Image (spheres, rainbow, N blue to C red):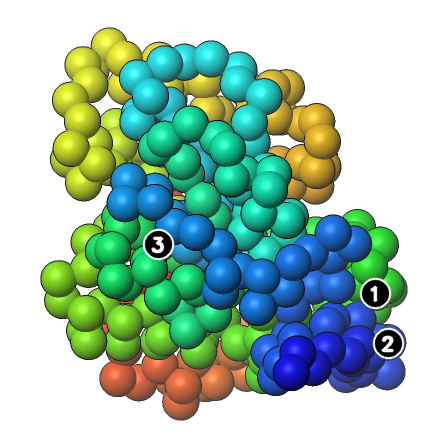
Amino acid sequence: MSQKHLVDAPDDGGDTLTSLNDNGFLIPNFPDGQGIQGVRSVRIRDDDVLICTFPKSGTHWVWEITRELLTGEITHDDVTMSQTFMEMVPEERYADLPSPRILSSHLRMKHLPDDVLNKKIKVITVLRNPKDTAVSYYTFLKTIPFAKYKGEFKNFLRPLFQGKFMYESWMDYVLDWELVKKTNPDQPVLTLFYEDIKQDQMREMRKICEFLGVERTDDFLSKVCDNTTIAAMRTHKNKGHDRSSVFRKGGVGDWKNWFTVAQNEWFDQFYQEKMADCPLQFKYTLLSTDTVH
Ligand code: A3P
Protein backbone atom coordinates (compact mmCIF):
# COMPACT_ATOMS: atom_id res chain seq x y z
CA MET A 1 0.00 0.00 0.00
CA SER A 2 1.19 3.50 -0.84
CA GLN A 3 2.34 5.51 2.18
CA LYS A 4 2.66 9.27 1.83
CA HIS A 5 2.88 12.06 4.35
CA LEU A 6 4.24 15.60 4.50
CA VAL A 7 7.48 16.24 6.39
CA ASP A 8 8.51 19.65 7.73
CA ALA A 9 12.27 19.34 8.17
CA PRO A 10 13.92 22.10 10.22
CA ASP A 11 17.07 23.81 8.98
CA ASP A 12 19.80 24.83 11.42
CA GLY A 13 17.88 28.00 12.37
CA GLY A 14 14.55 26.27 13.00
CA ASP A 15 12.87 27.31 9.71
CA THR A 16 11.15 24.34 8.07
CA LEU A 17 11.12 23.07 4.51
CA THR A 18 8.20 20.88 3.44
CA SER A 19 8.73 17.70 1.41
CA LEU A 20 6.53 14.70 0.74
CA ASN A 21 7.66 11.40 2.22
CA ASP A 22 6.62 9.04 -0.57
CA ASN A 23 7.14 5.48 0.64
CA GLY A 24 10.31 6.37 2.50
CA PHE A 25 11.88 8.85 0.06
CA LEU A 26 11.50 12.64 0.19
CA ILE A 27 10.18 14.26 -2.98
CA PRO A 28 8.50 17.62 -3.65
CA ASN A 29 4.81 17.83 -2.83
CA PHE A 30 3.96 18.60 -6.48
CA PRO A 31 0.33 19.67 -6.91
CA ASP A 32 -0.19 17.25 -9.87
CA GLY A 33 2.61 14.80 -9.06
CA GLN A 34 2.08 11.12 -9.76
CA GLY A 35 4.48 10.05 -7.02
CA ILE A 36 7.02 7.25 -7.09
CA GLN A 37 4.49 4.49 -7.74
CA GLY A 38 3.16 6.46 -10.71
CA VAL A 39 6.68 6.85 -12.09
CA ARG A 40 7.43 3.16 -11.57
CA SER A 41 4.51 2.23 -13.82
CA VAL A 42 5.27 4.66 -16.70
CA ARG A 43 5.37 2.78 -20.01
CA ILE A 44 8.88 3.13 -21.41
CA ARG A 45 9.51 2.98 -25.15
CA ASP A 46 12.66 1.43 -26.59
CA ASP A 47 13.74 4.76 -28.08
CA ASP A 48 13.02 6.98 -25.07
CA VAL A 49 15.98 9.04 -23.91
CA LEU A 50 16.08 9.77 -20.18
CA ILE A 51 17.83 12.73 -18.55
CA CYS A 52 18.66 12.03 -14.91
CA THR A 53 19.93 14.72 -12.58
CA PHE A 54 20.02 15.91 -9.01
CA PRO A 55 17.96 19.16 -8.94
CA LYS A 56 19.67 22.31 -10.25
CA SER A 57 22.36 20.52 -12.22
CA GLY A 58 21.37 21.95 -15.61
CA THR A 59 18.44 19.67 -16.44
CA HIS A 60 16.50 22.22 -18.50
CA TRP A 61 19.63 23.18 -20.41
CA VAL A 62 20.71 19.65 -21.32
CA TRP A 63 17.12 18.63 -22.05
CA GLU A 64 16.83 21.41 -24.64
CA ILE A 65 20.28 20.76 -26.15
CA THR A 66 19.40 17.06 -26.44
CA ARG A 67 16.05 17.84 -28.05
CA GLU A 68 17.63 20.04 -30.70
CA LEU A 69 20.40 17.54 -31.42
CA LEU A 70 18.01 14.60 -31.58
CA THR A 71 15.40 16.24 -33.82
CA GLY A 72 17.96 18.15 -35.91
CA GLU A 73 15.69 21.16 -35.63
CA ILE A 74 16.11 24.49 -33.94
CA THR A 75 12.59 25.45 -33.09
CA HIS A 76 11.08 27.15 -30.09
CA ASP A 77 8.99 24.08 -29.49
CA ASP A 78 6.22 24.27 -26.93
CA VAL A 79 7.33 21.01 -25.34
CA THR A 80 9.65 21.82 -22.45
CA MET A 81 11.44 19.68 -19.93
CA SER A 82 8.62 20.30 -17.44
CA GLN A 83 6.11 18.42 -19.60
CA THR A 84 8.15 15.22 -19.51
CA PHE A 85 9.36 15.52 -15.92
CA MET A 86 8.19 12.10 -14.80
CA GLU A 87 7.40 12.62 -11.12
CA MET A 88 5.94 16.11 -11.50
CA VAL A 89 3.22 15.49 -14.09
CA PRO A 90 0.82 12.61 -14.79
CA GLU A 91 1.91 10.18 -17.50
CA GLU A 92 -0.94 11.15 -19.85
CA ARG A 93 0.76 14.50 -20.48
CA TYR A 94 3.67 12.79 -22.21
CA ALA A 95 2.18 9.40 -23.14
CA ASP A 96 1.27 10.47 -26.68
CA LEU A 97 4.29 12.56 -27.58
CA PRO A 98 5.98 11.41 -30.78
CA SER A 99 9.11 9.26 -30.51
CA PRO A 100 11.80 9.69 -29.55
CA ARG A 101 10.65 11.26 -26.30
CA ILE A 102 13.10 12.87 -23.89
CA LEU A 103 11.95 12.10 -20.36
CA SER A 104 13.53 13.50 -17.22
CA SER A 105 13.65 12.75 -13.51
CA HIS A 106 15.51 13.60 -10.31
CA LEU A 107 14.65 10.22 -8.77
CA ARG A 108 17.11 7.39 -8.08
CA MET A 109 17.32 4.39 -10.40
CA LYS A 110 15.35 2.17 -8.00
CA HIS A 111 12.39 4.58 -8.31
CA LEU A 112 12.36 4.52 -12.12
CA PRO A 113 10.43 2.00 -14.26
CA ASP A 114 12.14 -1.41 -14.53
CA ASP A 115 12.08 -1.03 -18.31
CA VAL A 116 14.76 1.67 -18.13
CA LEU A 117 17.17 -1.19 -17.42
CA ASN A 118 15.24 -3.98 -19.18
CA LYS A 119 15.00 -2.08 -22.46
CA LYS A 120 18.44 -0.51 -22.01
CA ILE A 121 17.24 2.92 -23.01
CA LYS A 122 19.76 5.72 -23.37
CA VAL A 123 20.32 7.69 -20.17
CA ILE A 124 22.13 11.02 -19.90
CA THR A 125 23.15 11.98 -16.38
CA VAL A 126 24.26 15.55 -15.71
CA LEU A 127 26.33 16.34 -12.63
CA ARG A 128 27.24 19.76 -11.27
CA ASN A 129 29.65 20.74 -8.52
CA PRO A 130 27.82 20.46 -5.20
CA LYS A 131 28.60 23.99 -4.00
CA ASP A 132 26.95 25.72 -6.96
CA THR A 133 24.18 23.11 -6.90
CA ALA A 134 23.48 23.98 -3.24
CA VAL A 135 23.24 27.72 -3.96
CA SER A 136 21.02 27.16 -6.97
CA TYR A 137 18.80 24.77 -4.98
CA TYR A 138 18.51 27.21 -2.09
CA THR A 139 17.46 30.15 -4.30
CA PHE A 140 15.05 27.91 -6.21
CA LEU A 141 13.41 26.30 -3.17
CA LYS A 142 12.63 29.72 -1.74
CA THR A 143 10.45 30.39 -4.81
CA ILE A 144 8.53 27.09 -4.68
CA PRO A 145 5.23 27.62 -2.84
CA PHE A 146 4.87 23.98 -1.76
CA ALA A 147 8.32 23.95 -0.11
CA LYS A 148 7.13 26.76 2.22
CA TYR A 149 10.71 27.68 3.03
CA LYS A 150 11.89 31.03 4.37
CA GLY A 151 15.23 30.10 5.89
CA GLU A 152 18.67 31.63 5.45
CA PHE A 153 21.49 30.07 3.46
CA LYS A 154 23.72 29.79 6.51
CA ASN A 155 21.14 27.42 8.04
CA PHE A 156 20.38 25.49 4.85
CA LEU A 157 23.69 23.95 3.83
CA ARG A 158 24.22 21.30 6.51
CA PRO A 159 20.71 19.76 6.48
CA LEU A 160 20.76 19.86 2.67
CA PHE A 161 23.85 17.68 2.44
CA GLN A 162 22.59 15.49 5.26
CA GLY A 163 19.67 14.64 2.99
CA LYS A 164 16.89 16.24 5.05
CA PHE A 165 15.14 17.94 2.10
CA MET A 166 13.38 16.81 -1.08
CA TYR A 167 15.47 14.37 -3.17
CA GLU A 168 17.66 13.90 -0.09
CA SER A 169 21.45 13.74 -0.36
CA TRP A 170 23.44 14.98 -3.36
CA MET A 171 26.26 12.64 -2.38
CA ASP A 172 24.00 9.59 -2.28
CA TYR A 173 22.60 10.56 -5.68
CA VAL A 174 26.04 10.73 -7.27
CA LEU A 175 27.24 7.52 -5.60
CA ASP A 176 24.04 5.73 -6.59
CA TRP A 177 24.62 6.51 -10.27
CA GLU A 178 28.23 5.40 -10.06
CA LEU A 179 27.00 2.09 -8.66
CA VAL A 180 24.27 1.73 -11.29
CA LYS A 181 26.88 2.19 -14.03
CA LYS A 182 29.21 -0.32 -12.42
CA THR A 183 26.54 -2.97 -11.91
CA ASN A 184 24.94 -2.45 -15.35
CA PRO A 185 27.92 -2.06 -17.66
CA ASP A 186 25.81 -2.66 -20.77
CA GLN A 187 23.33 0.13 -19.96
CA PRO A 188 24.03 3.07 -22.28
CA VAL A 189 24.75 5.95 -19.87
CA LEU A 190 26.45 9.21 -20.81
CA THR A 191 27.67 11.26 -17.83
CA LEU A 192 28.09 14.96 -18.48
CA PHE A 193 29.32 17.72 -16.20
CA TYR A 194 27.64 21.13 -16.13
CA GLU A 195 31.03 22.86 -15.90
CA ASP A 196 32.35 21.00 -18.97
CA ILE A 197 29.38 22.19 -21.02
CA LYS A 198 30.02 25.74 -19.82
CA GLN A 199 33.66 25.32 -20.76
CA ASP A 200 33.21 23.89 -24.26
CA GLN A 201 29.64 23.29 -25.37
CA MET A 202 30.63 22.20 -28.90
CA ARG A 203 32.85 19.43 -27.53
CA GLU A 204 30.16 18.20 -25.14
CA MET A 205 27.49 18.33 -27.86
CA ARG A 206 29.65 16.14 -30.10
CA LYS A 207 29.68 13.59 -27.26
CA ILE A 208 25.88 13.76 -27.05
CA CYS A 209 25.56 13.29 -30.85
CA GLU A 210 27.81 10.26 -30.78
CA PHE A 211 25.87 8.80 -27.86
CA LEU A 212 22.53 9.37 -29.59
CA GLY A 213 23.84 8.10 -32.92
CA VAL A 214 23.09 11.29 -34.85
CA GLU A 215 25.36 13.29 -37.13
CA ARG A 216 25.12 17.08 -37.05
CA THR A 217 27.29 19.65 -38.83
CA ASP A 218 29.42 22.15 -36.91
CA ASP A 219 27.23 24.87 -38.38
CA PHE A 220 24.16 23.23 -36.82
CA LEU A 221 25.94 22.71 -33.49
CA SER A 222 26.88 26.33 -33.39
CA LYS A 223 23.23 27.30 -33.96
CA VAL A 224 22.25 25.04 -31.04
CA CYS A 225 24.84 26.88 -28.89
CA ASP A 226 23.28 30.23 -29.79
CA ASN A 227 19.77 28.94 -29.14
CA THR A 228 20.58 27.46 -25.74
CA THR A 229 22.40 30.32 -24.06
CA ILE A 230 20.77 31.17 -20.77
CA ALA A 231 19.53 34.46 -22.28
CA ALA A 232 17.92 32.65 -25.23
CA MET A 233 16.31 30.07 -22.97
CA ARG A 234 15.05 32.75 -20.61
CA THR A 235 13.22 34.25 -23.56
CA HIS A 236 11.88 31.10 -25.21
CA LYS A 237 11.36 28.67 -22.35
CA ASN A 238 9.87 30.81 -19.68
CA LYS A 239 6.30 29.72 -19.93
CA GLY A 240 4.22 27.07 -18.19
CA HIS A 241 6.01 25.49 -15.29
CA ASP A 242 9.37 27.03 -16.20
CA ARG A 243 9.83 29.96 -13.87
CA SER A 244 12.48 32.63 -14.28
CA SER A 245 14.25 31.21 -11.20
CA VAL A 246 15.09 28.17 -13.33
CA PHE A 247 17.22 30.45 -15.52
CA ARG A 248 18.89 32.41 -12.76
CA LYS A 249 22.62 33.04 -13.33
CA GLY A 250 23.85 29.95 -15.13
CA GLY A 251 27.51 30.20 -14.15
CA VAL A 252 30.27 28.41 -12.32
CA GLY A 253 31.55 29.68 -8.96
CA ASP A 254 28.59 31.67 -7.60
CA TRP A 255 29.03 29.63 -4.40
CA LYS A 256 31.93 31.96 -3.48
CA ASN A 257 29.35 34.72 -2.99
CA TRP A 258 27.38 32.56 -0.55
CA PHE A 259 29.65 30.19 1.40
CA THR A 260 31.36 31.56 4.49
CA VAL A 261 34.89 30.33 5.20
CA ALA A 262 33.50 28.15 8.01
CA GLN A 263 30.81 26.66 5.76
CA ASN A 264 33.39 25.95 3.08
CA GLU A 265 35.65 24.18 5.56
CA TRP A 266 32.73 22.18 6.94
CA PHE A 267 31.66 21.22 3.43
CA ASP A 268 35.13 20.17 2.23
CA GLN A 269 35.54 17.95 5.28
CA PHE A 270 32.06 16.44 4.88
CA TYR A 271 32.72 15.83 1.19
CA GLN A 272 35.96 13.99 1.98
CA GLU A 273 34.18 11.74 4.44
CA LYS A 274 31.27 10.87 2.16
CA MET A 275 33.04 10.77 -1.22
CA ALA A 276 36.45 9.36 -0.33
CA ASP A 277 36.03 6.38 -2.67
CA CYS A 278 34.45 8.33 -5.53
CA PRO A 279 36.84 8.93 -8.43
CA LEU A 280 34.79 11.78 -9.94
CA GLN A 281 36.41 15.21 -9.94
CA PHE A 282 34.26 18.34 -9.83
CA LYS A 283 35.26 21.80 -11.04
CA TYR A 284 34.36 24.60 -8.62
CA THR A 285 35.66 27.43 -10.72
CA LEU A 286 36.39 28.13 -14.38
CA LEU A 287 38.98 30.62 -15.58
CA SER A 288 37.80 32.68 -18.53
CA THR A 289 40.77 31.29 -20.42
CA ASP A 290 39.38 27.77 -19.86
CA THR A 291 36.22 28.60 -21.74
CA VAL A 292 35.72 28.01 -25.45
CA HIS A 293 32.92 30.01 -27.10
P1 A3P B 1 21.80 28.81 -11.22
O1 A3P B 1 20.68 28.84 -10.24
O2 A3P B 1 23.14 28.59 -10.59
O3 A3P B 1 21.79 29.97 -12.15
P2 A3P B 1 17.90 22.73 -13.49
O4 A3P B 1 17.51 22.92 -14.91
O5 A3P B 1 18.43 21.35 -13.22
O6 A3P B 1 16.80 23.13 -12.58
O7 A3P B 1 19.15 23.67 -13.18
C1 A3P B 1 18.99 25.06 -13.06
C2 A3P B 1 20.37 25.69 -13.09
O8 A3P B 1 20.88 25.61 -14.44
C3 A3P B 1 20.31 27.18 -12.76
O9 A3P B 1 21.57 27.50 -12.15
C4 A3P B 1 20.16 27.79 -14.13
O10 A3P B 1 20.49 29.15 -14.21
C5 A3P B 1 21.11 26.92 -14.94
N1 A3P B 1 20.78 26.99 -16.36
C6 A3P B 1 19.54 26.90 -16.94
N2 A3P B 1 19.65 27.10 -18.26
C7 A3P B 1 20.94 27.31 -18.53
C8 A3P B 1 21.67 27.59 -19.73
N3 A3P B 1 21.04 27.70 -20.90
N4 A3P B 1 23.01 27.76 -19.64
C9 A3P B 1 23.64 27.65 -18.45
N5 A3P B 1 23.01 27.40 -17.28
C10 A3P B 1 21.68 27.23 -17.32
- Marks 1/2 in contact by CB < 8 Å: the verdict is yes
> Mark 2, residues whose alpha carbon is within 10 Å: few (<14), some, or many (≥20)?
some
Q: Of 157 and 101, which appears nearest the observer?
A: 101
Residue at label 1?
A: 149
One can see residue 135 in this view: no
Q: Earlier in the sequence, mark 3 or mark 1?
A: 3
Query: Of the residues shown, which amino acid type is indicated by label 3?
Result: Thr
Label 2 – label 3 distance at C-alpha: 32 Å
* Residue at position x 41%, y 39% in the image: 102
In the depicted structure, whether residue 230 falls above or below residue 191: above
Whole-percent x, y for residue 176 in the image: 36, 75
Q: Is the residue 195 above or below the residue 98 in the image?
A: below
Q: Answer with the quarter of the image where residue 289 lies.
A: top left
Instruction: State which tag comes first along the sequence, 1 or 2.
Output: 2
Does ligand 1 reach within 8 Å of label 2's beta carbon?
A: no
Which numbered circle lies on residue 125? 3
Secondary structure at badge 3 equals strand
